[in-house]
Amino acid sequence: MSTFLERDGLVARWRRINPNMESGLRDPCELDARGDAVLYSHPSARRQIVLTDAYCQITEQIGHVAAMAVPVTTTSFGIRIPDVIWMPPDNWERIDRSAPVPFVPALCVEVLLDRDTRDDIDLRVGAYLKGGAREVIVVDEHGRVEFWGANGLQSASKFGITLSLEQMYFDEPAWSSIPNAHC
């Protein structure tokens, strides 16, 4: 017997752990590939501002069918909750909105600000791309925006997205605290 749960097993376990997701009564849990719960912490105020800003810019640039904090089912990393997802309208029509999206949407965004996902971000990006995402956008704690595709780090978005995020919400890079440092 495999130590990894199949998609249906993951979804069933997720529903048992997250029974009140529709009513918003509690913070959701993610599940790893074995079906073990991984706490998904509520975003800090500044992280909420940044991910909402990213969401708004994405919907303005490629369409309104985006969502925030929607669980998605990956083939290799369990059920994860990207900060923002986007997919074509016909994909929304064919999913059960009371369960995790049964596939990885075309675009996933992860904002690393005030979040303990730096250690697993490579696994998340890989799982989203392996699961069908055409692009993954990562916004790091310093406000740097990376666009990832099937061939690795890209110089620009495949969707033509540009994100202009307010720098005041991000941590300063370590080098900027050195007196007289000029870059």
Image (cartoon, rainbow, N blue to C red):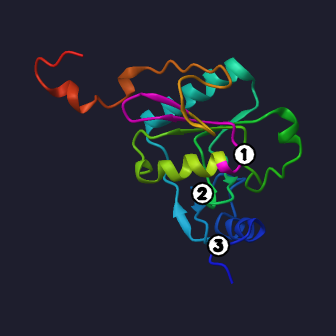
Looking at the rendered image, the quarter that the C terminus falls into is top left
Which class describes the residues within 10 Å of circle 3: few (<14), some (14-19), or many (20+)? some
Residue 92 x %, y %: 83, 40
Q: Is residue 134 magenta?
A: yes
What span is in magenta?
130-147
Chain-order first, disc 2 or disc 3:
3
Farthest front residue?
151
Q: Which residue is mark 3?
A: 4
Query: What SS does tag 3 mark?
Result: loop
Specify whether residue 117 is painted magenta. no
The numbered dot on residue 90 is none
Specify the farthest residue to the bottom: 1
Q: Residue at x 72, y 53 (%)?
A: 22
Kind of residue sitting beneath label 1: Gly
Does residue 46 sit above or below 21 in this rendering? above
How far apart are the two marked residues, 2 and 3, measured between alpha carbons? 21 Å
Q: Are marks 3 and 1 in contact (CB under 8 Å)?
A: no
Q: Is residue 183 left or right of residue 46?
A: left
Percent from the top left, x then y, of residue 112? 44, 41
Secondary element type, mark 2: loop
Q: Which one is closest to the eye, mark 2 or mark 1? A: 1
- Residue 28 is tagged as 2
Q: Quadrant of residue 34?
A: bottom right
Q: How far apart are labels 3 and 1 at the CA level?
A: 19 Å
Residue at x-position 39% and y-position 42%: 114
Q: Check the image and name the residue furthest to the left.
A: 179
Labels 3 and 1: the sequence-earlier one:
3
Q: How busy is the neighbourhood of tag 2: few (under 14 within 10 Å), some, or many (20 plus)?
A: many
Q: CA distance from mark 2 to mark 1?
A: 23 Å
Residue 145, compared with residue 160, is above or below; it is below
Name the kind of residue labelled 3 in the image.
Phe
Q: Which type of secondary structure does the marked residue at label 1 adopt?
A: loop
